[in-house]
């Protein structure tokens, strides 16, 4: 796609911007109460009153999607925050110091890394139970291995650079060298893995909530809506279609944006 | 040979480590298995006796060694909820999940390799651009939503299969494979999109290398250069990706099984997680870990065959 214009960046930021606005709107305003049931509009189709129709309890789907996308973004952001922060810490220590600490931690990280992260998250959920915050913790822990590895390899590469030696000669502490000098230089690599991680978190949260072990009611969740909608595919296809579309738009926008940024950096 | 031995040793070590981590995780959870088995009105002496019987008083490492030995012998403990041996509950489900993952894997290769090569050969063309667009969207679709869309479109509208009409492999193998086709496709498509993208850029990268130019200048035509020289190198990163993808597919089939009501490992895993039936959860997780690690081992060994430059680290 050797176009002059960076379409990925343009479309990606537009889509991401719209999705963030959509989610912010959901925080402050929903056309109806997302929990309000109304027997008369059960599985109602698309109308001017209900732009996306109603679900099996007569709840307004647009309101629930607005609310649910907020939950999804919140969980994804929390997950990535845990994964990144702990990953930076482990990766920095093992990459910078090496030695026995590195050997032991990396053995464990490698063993966990071989494991699909959704499975790790399932193990944690079965230990600590479902719910919005538990999903963040479970997914966050499951994301630590991959972030640690990325940060570690960056630190291994950076620690022999001249700027690090000169900082050492100036008497900077190891902590200062790691987090003030080296860390900012890992940002280009780290930021793209954060974006990929964010998308994986959105997909993982949706998957777990779909399985019924993620976000629990009364919190609306896109994944959960999809699992409820599955029995009504014939009578109300929109019930499944809209939450799914929102997930796709979220992930698509973000991945285009990530790709656009990395192209712009070249 | 030395390489293979080294890989197998590290495979066994990783397997021990992973299963110990899983075992330890389930051993430290709050909540007493003896208490949950007997109920809250059990007397302290009954509890103590059962704890003794279940071996809960012994040190963690001893319990792990015991558990690991009996696991290898095929005894995976007893389900809390059903009071049945776990092995009987999961061993006949294993082929279902495995078939699903392998079918998804084959579909991924069948979709990604030809299209990836085609896109690379026609870089910048209309079809390449079309594939790029479809690819970006496909990568963004959660597999379970793809499954729901397929249920709706192929199942309910076109009636190519009966949603929920799972056919057991014990009675009808062709019917079983036919029912698994769409679930496998739902798992495969997003992975195929990623593999395709990787293969395309890898082929394009290799095409610009000196050895490719040399091969052209010796008078080879595009096909000869592509299939004799470029592809060998271009496939290396793709094989790494496919190995990880297969591991993901085994885990991903848990979700897809729910979408298509397939009674595989995922189904029992879900009921056991919500029922806090830890021996079952533990056994399934360890089984999936074994599958994943075997896949990684095979990838490492295949790697060595396609790229003899890889020596021991």
Image (cartoon, coloured by chain):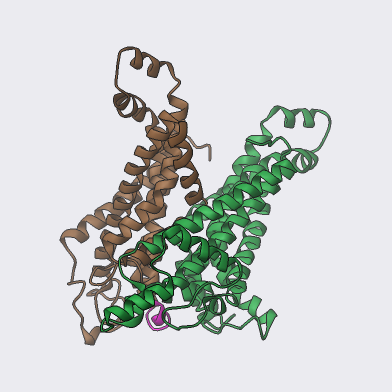
Chain colours: A brown, B green
Q: Where is residue A192 in the image (x, y as percent from the top left)?
A: 41, 40
Q: Where is residue B228 in the image (x, y as percent from the top left)?
A: 79, 41
Q: Is residue B255 magenta?
A: no
Of A123 and B15, the residue lying toward us: B15
Residue at image point 42% right, 34% down: A94
- Residue B58: quadrant of the picture: bottom left
Residue A212 higher or lower than A28, as above or below: below
Of B210 and B287, the residue lying toward us: B287
Q: Where is residue A43 in the image (x, y as percent from the top left)?
A: 31, 82
Looking at this view, name the residue that lies furthest to the right: B219
Q: What stretch is highlighted in magenta?
A: A230-236
Of A156 and B259, the residue lying toward us: A156
Residue A84 higher or lower than B112, as above or below: above
Total marks in image: 0
Question: Can the viewer see residue A228 in this picture?
Answer: no
Of A226 and B155, the residue lying toward us: A226
Residue A66 higher or lower than B124, as above or below: below
Q: Is residue A234 magenta?
A: yes
Residue A79 higher or lower than A62, as above or below: above
Looking at this view, name the residue that lies furthest to the left: A28
Location of the N terminus of chain B by quadrant is top right
Location of the C terminus of chain B by quadrant is top right
Looking at the image, residue B219 sits to the left or right of residue A222; the answer is: right
Residue at image point 65% right, 80% down: B169
Q: Position of residue A132 (x, y in %)?
A: 27, 63
Question: Can the viewer see residue B248 in this picture?
Answer: yes
């Amino acid at each position: 796609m050797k176009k002059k214009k960076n379409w990925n960046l343009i479309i990606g930021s537009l889509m991401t911007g719209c999705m963030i606005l959509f989610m912010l709107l959901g925080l402050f305003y929903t056309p109806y109460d997302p929990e309000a049931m109304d027997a008369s509009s059960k599985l109602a189709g698309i109308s001017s009153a209900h732009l996306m129709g109603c679900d099996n309890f007569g709840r307004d789907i647009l309101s629930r999607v607005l609310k649910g996308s907020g939950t999804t973004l919140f969980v994804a952001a929390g997950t990535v925050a845990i994964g990144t922060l702990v990953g930076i810490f482990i990766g920095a220590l093992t990459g910078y110091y090496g030695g026995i600490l590195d050997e032991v931690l990396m053995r464990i990280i490698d063993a966990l890394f071989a494991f699909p992260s959704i499975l790790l998250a399932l193990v944690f959920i079965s230990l600590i139970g479902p719910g919005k915050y538990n999903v963040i913790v479970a997914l966050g822990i499951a994301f630590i291995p991959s972030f640690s590895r990325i940060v570690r390899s960056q630190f291994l590469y950076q620690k022999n650079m001249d700027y690090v030696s000169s900082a050492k000669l100036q008497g900077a502490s190891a902590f200062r060298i790691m987090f003030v000098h080296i860390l900012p230089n890992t940002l280009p690599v780290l930021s793209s893995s954060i974006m990929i991680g964010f998308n994986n978190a959105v997909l993982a949260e949706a998957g777990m909530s779909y399985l019924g072990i993620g976000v629990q009611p009364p919190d609306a969740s896109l994944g959960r809506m999809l699992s409820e909608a599955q029995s009504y595919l014939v009578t109300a296809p929109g019930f499944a279609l809209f939450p799914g579309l929102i997930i796709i738009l979220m992930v698509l926008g973000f991945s285009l944006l990530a790709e656009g940024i990395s192209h712009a950096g070249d | 040979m030395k390489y293979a031995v080294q890989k197998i040793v590290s495979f066994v070590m990783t397997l021990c480590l992973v299963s110990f981590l899983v075992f330890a995780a389930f051993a430290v959870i709050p909540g007493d298995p003896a208490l949950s088995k007997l109920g809250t009105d059990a007397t302290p002496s009954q509890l103590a006796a059962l704890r003794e019987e279940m071996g809960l008083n012994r040190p963690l490492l001893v319990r792990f060694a015991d558990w690991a030995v009996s696991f290898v012998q095929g005894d995976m403990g007893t389900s809390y909820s059903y009071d049945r041996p776990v092995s009987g509950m999961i061993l006949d489900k294993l082929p279902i999940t495995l078939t699903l993952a392998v079918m998804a894997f084959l579909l991924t290769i069948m979709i990604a390799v030809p299209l990836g090569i085609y896109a690379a050969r026609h870089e910048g063309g209309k079809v390449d651009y079309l594939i790029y667009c479809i690819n970006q969207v496909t990568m963004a679709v959660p597999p379970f939503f793809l499954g729901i869309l397929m249920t709706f479109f192929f199942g309910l509208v076109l009636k190519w299969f009966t949603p929920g009409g799972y056919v057991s492999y014990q009675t009808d193998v062709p019917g079983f494979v036919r029912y698994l086709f769409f679930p496998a496709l739902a798992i495969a498509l997003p992975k195929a999109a990623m593999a395709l993208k990787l293969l395309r850029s890898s082929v394009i990268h290799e095409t610009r290398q000196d050895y490719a130019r040399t091969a052209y200048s010796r008078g080879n035509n595009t096909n000869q250069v592509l299939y004799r020289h470029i592809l060998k190198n271009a496939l290396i990163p793709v094989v790494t990706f496919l190995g990880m993808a297969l591991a993901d597919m085994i885990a991903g089939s848990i979700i897809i099984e729910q979408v298509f009501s397939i009674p595989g490992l995922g189904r029992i895993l879900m009921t056991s997680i919500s029922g806090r039936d830890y021996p079952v959860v533990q056994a399934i997780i360890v089984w999936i870990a074994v599958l994943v690690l075997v896949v990684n081992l095979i990838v490492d060994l295949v790697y060595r065959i396609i790229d003899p430059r890889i020596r021991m680290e």
